[in-house]
Amino acid sequence: MSNTSASPANHKVAPADVYGIARHHRFQWEEAQQCHVLLFPEGMIKLNGSAGEVLKRVDGNKTVDQVVQELEATFPGVPDLRDDVLSMLDLALEKAWIEKRN
């Protein structure tokens, strides 16, 4: 089992951080696209399955560590899952899809 308290120094997000979907963005399942999307005034971002699984857990209440733990329980045995989730959240933060709530 991975160490849930460790966060590599190269990640912008930390285990105790709490994030939510950014204002002016809406996360939803898009039936026509058969995937999760982020809607915003200027357009839409079509998310792959992994990104959708991560962002649907980013609810403004869970810590990054809790999101990782949920994904580890849902997808046991996936190698490098923690690092992949942190990298995805780093990208979402960089793109302003999510914002810090704590």
Image (cartoon, rainbow, N blue to C red):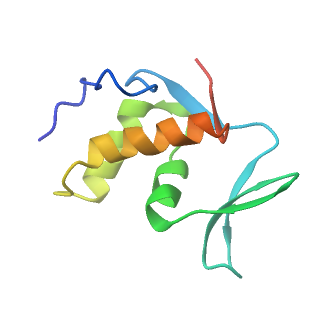
Q: Position of residue 16 (x, y in %)?
A: 41, 21
On-image quarter of the C terminus: top right
Is residue 100 positioned above or below 75 on the image? above
Q: Is residue 15 left or right of residue 19?
A: left
Q: Quadrant of residue 36?
A: bottom right
**Between 13 and 18, which is closer to the camera in this rendering?**
13
Q: Residue at x 52, y 59 (%)?
A: 52
Q: Position of residue 33 (x, y in %)?
A: 66, 78
Judged from this view, the residue extending furthest toward the top is: 102
Q: Position of residue 64 (x, y in %)?
A: 42, 32
Q: Is residue 44 left or right of residue 91?
A: right
Q: Residue at x 54, y 49 (%)?
A: 55
Q: Position of residue 62 (x, y in %)?
A: 48, 33
Q: Quadrant of residue 21?
A: top right
Q: Is residue 70 left or right of residue 32?
A: left
Q: Quadrant of residue 77?
A: bottom left
Q: Residue at x 28, y 26 (%)?
A: 8
Q: Is residue 78 left or right of residue 66?
A: left
**Between 48 and 67, which is closer to the camera in this rendering?**
48
On-image quarter of the N terminus: top left
Is residue 81 positioned above or below 77 on the image? above
Q: Residue at x 47, y 50 (%)?
A: 54
Judged from this view, the residue extending furthest toward the bottom is: 32
